[in-house]
Image (cartoon, rainbow, N blue to C red):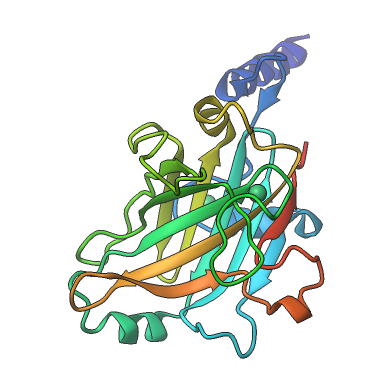
Amino acid sequence: MKKILTLLAVAAMVAVACDKDNNGSSYKAPISIDGDFADWAALDASKVVVAKNAEGSPWEAVKEIRVYADKKFVYYYMKFDSEVLADMQENSADKSLPLRLNINTDGEFESGYHNYFIEGYDMMTEGHITDEEGNYVSYDGELYLRTEDGWGDPVLASGNNLTSGAGKDNEYEIALSREVFDGAISSSPIGNTFQTSIRFYYLDDAGKWTELSNMPNLSIDESENGWGHLLEITTNK
Ligand SMILES: [Ca+2]
Ligand SMILES: [Ca+2]
């Protein structure tokens, strides 16, 4: 009996350590934003969407991204080529790295923003993953909504826990809170299926944002999913 009670006590402690959602079921984050990437390796690989830098793409500084979504968060992983990155930043005004997460929640590719390719994403987050000295900082994104008038002012300022991030060496991970996102853009929440991509920048010698990479970056003709330069993500429940 004593053993059973001990087990129950442990179970109760574990339950307390986990978040409770509205349904009362527990949530344990599969990814910790801590600059340790072993948690990514532990995910079910069949549920992680991976994009590697396409051969012949105009960009070389980002080697790979991964995206994994569950009911609470959308998680992003990225791996850089340190040497290429350092070369590009050699004459940078400062070493901060701006980054945008692009998200298409309406499932169609006419509305929203188009740059090079078939995109049509209607929301983006914007922030930095490093400070001016090039040290990783937490990605504290502000949220923008694309309208007929352009991007306009952010619909959610930074400092609202929309995103967080952590990096080590040439890897970085981000968690985006679906609850914060949906609260800011209630008209178009992130659905079970959505599309996303990442745009990377560095600062040139005049401090101007300059492209480091776009991911994914398959050419349209080679794209297998038909979504152009967005990855299609299905939420793991
Ligand atoms: Ca981690
Ligand atoms: Ca769209």
Q: Along the horizontal axis of the image, is 187 left or right of 160?
A: right
Residue drawn 44% across and 67% down? 200
Q: Residue furthest bottom?
A: 56
- Of the pair 41 and 159, the residue shown nearer to us: 159
Q: Examine the rendered structure and indicate whether residue 155 appears above or below residue 115.
A: above
Q: Along the horizontal axis of the image, is 139 left or right of 114?
A: left
Q: Examine the rendered structure and indicate whether residue 1 appears above or below residue 48.
A: above
Query: How many numbered circles does the render carry?
Result: 0
Quadrant (top left/top right/bottom left/bottom right) for the N terminus: top right
- Of the pair 58 and 40, the residue shown nearer to us: 58
- Of the pair 63 and 24, the residue shown nearer to us: 63
Q: Examine the rendered structure and indicate whether residue 182 appears above or below residue 152.
A: above
Q: Examine the rendered structure and indicate whether residue 158 appears above or below residue 168.
A: above
Give the image location of residue 27, x and y in percent: 65, 28
Q: Along the horizontal axis of the image, is 196 left or right of 233?
A: left
Q: Residue furthest front?
A: 148
Residue 154 falls in image quadrant: top left
Residue drawn 69% across and 34% down? 71
Quadrant (top left/top right/bottom left/bottom right) for the C terminus: top right
Residue drawn 51% across and 45% down? 148
Give the image location of residue 78, x and y in percent: 53, 65
Give the image location of residue 90, x and y in percent: 24, 84
Give the image location of residue 152, x and y in percent: 39, 43
Residue drawn 77% across and 80% down? 222
Residue 82 falls in image quadrant: bottom left
